[in-house]
Image: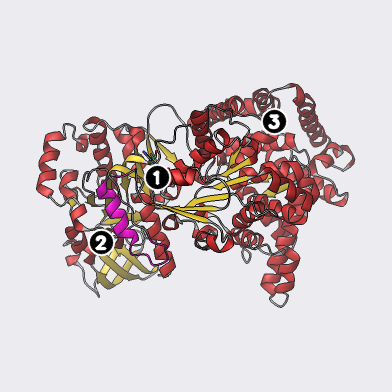
Amino acid sequence: MDLTKLNEKQHEAVTHIEGPALVIAGAGSGKTRVLTNRIAYLIEENHVSPGRILAITFTNKAANEMKERIAELIDYDVSRMWVGTFHSICVRILRRCIDRLGYSSNFIIFDSEEQKIVVKECILELNLDTKDYDPNSIRSIISNEKNGRTRPDEFIKENFTDFRKRNIGEIYKLYEKKLKKSNALDFDDLLVKTLDILEQDEEIRNEYRDRFEYILVDEYQDTNKVQYMLVRLLAKKSDSRENVFVVGDEDQSIYGWRGADINNILDFEKDFPSAKVIKLERNYRSTQTILEAANAVIKNNTNRIGKNLWTEDNEGAKILINKSFDEKSEALFMAERIYNEKNIQSVGYDEMAILVRTRAQTRAIEERMRLEGIPYKIVGGQEFYSRKEIKDLMGYLKLVQNNNENYSFRRVINVPKRGIGKKTLELLDQFASEHDMSLFEAAELSAQIGVSKKASESLKRFTDMINEICEKQGGMDLVDLVEHVYEDSGYKDFMEANRSVEGQARLENINEFFSAVRDFQDRSEETELEDFLAHISLLTDIEKTEDGEGERLTIMTVHSAKGLEFDVVFIGGLEENMFPIVRDGNDDDIEEERRLFYVAITRAKKRLYMSFAQDRLIYGNYHKRMISRFINEIPEELVNSNKKKIQMEEKKQNKYNLFTGGFTAPAKKTVPSTPASSSTDSAAASSSQQSFTSNENKLFKSGDKIQHKKWGTGTIVQVKGDEITAAFDNMGVKTMMMPYAPIKKI
Ligand SMILES: Nc1ncnc2c1ncn2[C@@H]1O[C@H](COP(=O)(O)OP(=O)(O)OP(=O)(O)O)[C@@H](O)[C@H]1O
Ligand SMILES: [Mg+2]
């Protein structure tokens, strides 16, 4: 195996064999590369059987890439290797031993929407009100308690004197019961139940401890408590051969809100006192300018081990910071730059990414990209698998997998319409709970339970259809099976009968779904229905991508961009309370936001653009924006401050004027005539921090009576820059943005 492409420190990490090790290193220093090379090295040079290696990555995509890389390095069939996310590894373990907890191995996984349906059902069954007990918040309380490993009975006991909490405990208890009855696990269960089994069952614990002789974890800084306990449990061996190798960067810990605990990395040495610690400080990804900006920003955090990255790469282009009028002109600036990058610098679309802090920001950007014909894909955006038609089809498949699962039964029993009304369902429900059976079983006996003859016949046709598919299942491959389900259920006819534009779009989604099924069948080792269903459930939100042909620009949240790299990166919306999002001004929050910003900056290899807007449409209203404090943390000399030069360059290069492409700004006069002229240096940017001034509000002052188009008459109570607050006679107090509010003085 060729180790010459590693530097000395990397080499040391790759060839470290026995005993715990921690590679703690900044972005782009080759952590993932080291991890991949080490796996190859263990197999090739140390003759470790691939089945004895467990490698944990942050996304399924990263797992696939890792397998591909290993196969390239040592030409080995890697398809059966234990490389995956915590969740996918746990599913694999649970399939083999969940019977110990009284589940059967073909369990299904409930996504957040399904969980919410169950929670709601529990609330209603306990005669509580969903207004007092919001299903979404209850769901997250349950999730927290599970991760803290508090069981329902304990929770109830602990909160016995608190009426509300006790009720929440009851909901939690019923929720657990219902999941078990459906032989279903939620996302948290996957990890927690694995941990339960490993803790309780010595035989299984030892089996997996023996099996996983070498454990490797990428992005270790983002493991939460349960994940950390899993690693520790598997890694602690009686003979003290603790071959656990973790790589991480405390500066990139960005999942605190999901329970990730930065202390896991800070404490690794305490848990494994013999751990070898290796630091990598040379960055291979970015130019000097980009790296210096990243270093300068992260320096402002206190909760870190501290390290300084360096590179031998050239200085590279300065960072261009752009001030835009609003979110539309921000998107225009990006489109214009992307056009230049593609046509003048010859950077492929797939080497460019726009990173945003929140999903809501992508709408304006998408609109502009579509208008300019720039191909893009959204990662972590509209979730393909949560669309109705896909969920319906998945509902059928889940019912085939497990007839007794009531939620899928309810979802599909009357889609397409089969004349099964509310009344019939109520009777089924009642009969099922009286006889402790599932809705499907009740439906099979429908002739005896007093439903109308028509409904009974219809239910019989339905259960016969599902039973028939189940019987034939063994002789079909996955694609055949899904096709059968699609046709036999009548869903296909139902879809094809809808000739509207929306119906056509839905059909396209179904076709896309079939491509996904085919792709899964072609690429996977295990292609049973249960494997496919688990595969879909395990696609994390951050990697649900709308697939498509050809080279495309990526638009994604910073969270989804972890571990990735692009030649050109745009970071949008660098405004206070957008990036950073400040919830309650907590310092920890700001530090996590800063780490996010650090992650964003360090995705860029060659060129970095940042932008902020003066105004932004948020929840349907325009709001004045203040430039992000983070921009001020970037040293001025790294920022392009030569406005004139950019303008001239712009003139020379800009053969295509995007402004002719149908731009419709809300107020034309304030839109910069070319995007480049709105570029600003960091000094100018910081001076604009004091709120932008506009003349238009001079017409108004406190005490003026006004007429609003929708809200009627009122009196201005405050004027602050462009922000006007008025007390309306019938609508209460409202704040409006001057240039947009439809008001006049009366
Ligand atoms: N020794 C090396 N020689 C040449 N290129 C290298 C070397 N080490 C790493 N690289 C390259 O540097 C880039 C960053 O490496 P890698 O993604 O492994 O870094 P990382 O530390 O995992 O980054 P992140 O913290 O963002 O996950 C990759 O393109 C990788 O191929
Ligand atoms: Mg990495």
| Quadrant placement of the C terminus | bottom left
Instruction: Say whether residue 294 is magenta.
Output: yes
Q: Is residue 559 magenta?
A: no
Q: Secondary structure at mark 2?
A: helix
Check the image and tell me how it is coloured.
secondary structure
Total marks shown come to: 3
Residue 685, given in percent of the width and then of the height, sits at 20, 58
Marks 1 and 2, the one that precedes in the sequence: 1
In the image: residue 187, left or right of residue 222: right
Is residue 25 shown above or below 389?
below
> Considering depth in this image, is 648 or 694 the residue closer to the camera?
648
Q: Which residue is mark 1?
A: 8
Determine the image quadrant of residue 471.
top right
695 or 300, nearer to the observer:
300
Question: Can you identify the residue that label 2 sits on?
Answer: 632
Q: Which mark is residue 528?
A: 3
Which image quadrant is residue 454 in? top right
Disc 3/disc 1 C-alpha distance (Å): 45 Å
Can you give x and y, in whole percent of width and height, for residue 250 in the image? 44, 58
Q: Amino acid at mark 3?
A: Glu
